[in-house]
């Protein structure tokens, strides 16, 4: 079915659209409005604040404000409407299918949100006495138990605040173990596959290790022969993602673990893609020494826009003694938070002020308990099934990056199907916005030319996958006609703003509003 025909039959003919301008500047229910600072009118007010008592002492001393605060004067309805409209310009997992790969934009069951908002969890203060937070400590301990059970690992550090923070935790533990063996001066090299997430080499480099890339083979996996050649007495660790960022299972993972161990190094596994294998494979059985689990990717939690994450790190017996403080133990009088070094352990220090991301712990445990072990297994299975359905239904019109086998939780395409059409991966993704979808991850992983990485997750049903696939098939077929470059270059057409200079917006964002100054000509780029 050609959906675009059906749609344009009910609407104004598309050719009239470019010249059609409304008096208000609004486009239907998409409203154009000024910045909130520009809407302010001096003296307009939403709440009455009592005047400070005459002669009240200045308790702030030198910190007392000298000038006005500079906030706009607005009524309450203005503020409510402004932020409601802004929220409606957003596209999130609650608006529709979010195809971004390598990020796992997953449905967040409302039950988890309800649990996280229970006052007994939400209103805790991290400095409350231990005896008043026994329930919270028990929750952290229970979650730790299930993370260890699912992964088969003997220890877990709960405090890391995100995946990258977890990498830091695991790699510092590895560094501490190497130091303890007296090899700190010699083991300075970390092997990282070319397809790795950027945080892996960044973490190793931050700790002063030399990053040595391992090439991928033609099947998108680690080139085993190249890896073996790189092993030596100066190798501290390999940082490997499994399933990797091409959405493929590293079939040689056990061999890789054995080889790095034989060379005296450690195996750091990036577990951000654990949602593809949870309940099916235990990382301990694969020879992993340290692995972060992105609770916000595998066990729900809304994380669009850089929201809070949580990256607990499971550790092997070799690394467990170096786990950071604080951690929870069962003490004589209930749960205790260990804040100082205990006999037989060598914690490398602290990573974070307190115990970790409590709200994410509550959500993750609610997710685990409501799914049960069979449900977690089913979620991984369905995530993989959905990605393979997309791969299977698109492989004749788009070009799978690694043909000849199934994928795991995400389907990777390259831009070979766009060759000689004048349409780039970016143009294709922009056209997908007009179709009502958040584009897939583009140009990552770097090992694939013009990459398009699609991760549907387990909670999309067949109808929603089919609708998404129909849009992609329509666009791919259109692009391949070869004379549609102009159509794609002009996309998106139906958004509040058209093509922005994204590089410039990221590199030189305009973050401060300055009064009485006409907007710079580049303002649109940074909106
Ligand atoms: C998301 C991700 C990370 C980083 O996790 P953050 O929580 O964003 O710091 C690391 N590796 C891979 C493979 C990822 O997908």
Image (tube, rainbow, N blue to C red):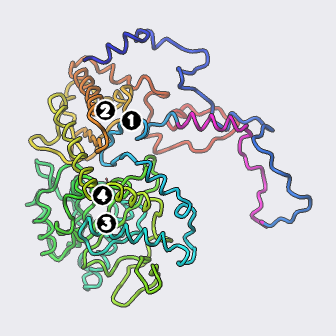
Q: Quadrant of ligand 1?
A: bottom left
Q: Helix, strand or loop at disc 1? A: loop
User: How much space separates mark 1 and mark 4, taking CA atoms?
Assistant: 26 Å
Q: Are marks 3 and 1 in contact (CB under 8 Å)?
A: no
Left or right of 372, for residue 69: right
Left or right of 79, for residue 285: left
User: How much space separates mark 2 and mark 3, taking CA atoms?
Assistant: 32 Å
Above or below: residue 180 compared with residue 126: below
Mark 1 or mark 4: which comes first in sequence? 1
Circle 2 is placed at which residue position?
Answer: 464
Circle 4 is placed at which residue position?
Answer: 372
Instruction: Please tell me the numbered disc located at residue 96.
Output: 1
**Which of label 1 and label 4 is nearer to you?**
4
Q: Are marks 2 and 1 in contact (CB under 8 Å)?
A: yes
Please report the bounds of the magenta region as a residue range. 60-87
Give how far across and how far down residue 170 sits, in percent. Answer: 32, 70
Q: Quadrant of residue 363?
A: bottom left
The residue lying at 20 percent from left, 48 percent from top is 408
Q: Please rate how many residues cluster around mark 2, counting C-alpha atoms within 10 Å: few if below 14, some from 14 to 19, many from 20.
A: some
């Amino acid at each position: 079915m050609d959906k675009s025909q059906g749609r344009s039959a009910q609407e104004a003919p598309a050719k009239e659209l470019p010249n059609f301008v409304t008096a208000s500047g609004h486009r239907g229910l998409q409203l154009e409005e000024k910045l909130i600072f520009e809407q302010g009118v001096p003296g307009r007010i939403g709440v009455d604040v009592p005047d400070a008592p005459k002669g009240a002492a200045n308790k702030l001393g030198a910190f007392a404000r000298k000038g006005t605060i500079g906030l706009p004067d607005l009524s309450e309805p203005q503020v409510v409407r402004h932020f409601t409209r802004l929220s409606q310009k957003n596209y999130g997992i609650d608006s529709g299918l979010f195809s971004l790969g390598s990020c796992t934009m997953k449905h967040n069951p409302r039950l988890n949100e309800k649990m996280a908002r229970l006052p007994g969890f939400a209103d805790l203060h991290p400095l409350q006495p231990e005896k008043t937070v026994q329930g919270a400590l028990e929750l952290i301990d229970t979650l730790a138990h299930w993370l260890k059970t699912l992964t088969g690992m003997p220890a877990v550090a709960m405090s890391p605040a995100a995946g990258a923070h977890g990498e830091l935790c695991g790699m510092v533990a590895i560094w501490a173990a190497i130091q303890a063996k007296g090899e700190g001066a010699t083991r300075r090299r970390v092997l990282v596959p070319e397809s790795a997430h950027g945080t892996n080499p960044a973490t190793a480099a931050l700790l002063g290790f030399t990053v040595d890339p391992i090439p991928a083979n033609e099947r998108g996996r680690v080139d085993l022969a190249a890896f073996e050649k790189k092993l030596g007495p100066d190798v501290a660790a390999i940082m490997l993602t499994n399933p990797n960022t091409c959405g493929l299972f590293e079939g040689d993972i056990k061999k890789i673990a054995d080889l790095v161990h034989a060379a005296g190094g450690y195996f750091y596994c990036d577990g951000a893609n654990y949602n593809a294998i949870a309940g099916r494979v235990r990382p301990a059985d694969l020879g992993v020494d340290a692995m972060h689990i992105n609770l916000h990717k595998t066990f729900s939690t809304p994380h669009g826009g850089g929201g809070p994450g949580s990256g607990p790190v499971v550790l092997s017996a070799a690394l467990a003694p170096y786990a950071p403080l604080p951690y929870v133990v069962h003490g004589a009088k209930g749960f205790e938070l260990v804040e100082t070094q205990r006999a037989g352990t060598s914690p490398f220090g602290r990573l974070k002020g307190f115990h970790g991301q409590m709200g994410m712990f509550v959500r993750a445990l609610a997710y685990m308990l409501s799914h049960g072990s069979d449900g977690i297994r089913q979620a991984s299975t369905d995530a993989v099934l959905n990605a393979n359905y997309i791969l299977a239904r698109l492989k004749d019109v788009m070009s799978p990056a690694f043909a000849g086998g199934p994928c795991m939780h995400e389907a990777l395409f390259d831009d070979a199907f766009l060759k000689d059409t004048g349409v780039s991966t970016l143009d294709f993704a922009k056209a997908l916005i007009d179709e009502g979808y958040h584009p897939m991850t583009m140009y990552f992983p770097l090992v694939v030319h013009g990459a398009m990485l699609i991760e549907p997750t387990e909670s999309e049903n067949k109808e929603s996958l089919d609708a998404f696939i129909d849009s992609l098939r329509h666009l791919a077929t259109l692009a391949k006609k070869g004379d549609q470059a102009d159509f794609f270059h002009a996309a998106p057409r139906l958004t509040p703003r058209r093509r922005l200079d994204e590089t410039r917006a990221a590199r030189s964002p305009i973050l401060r509003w300055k009064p009485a100054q006409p907007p710079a000509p580049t303002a649109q780029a940074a909106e």
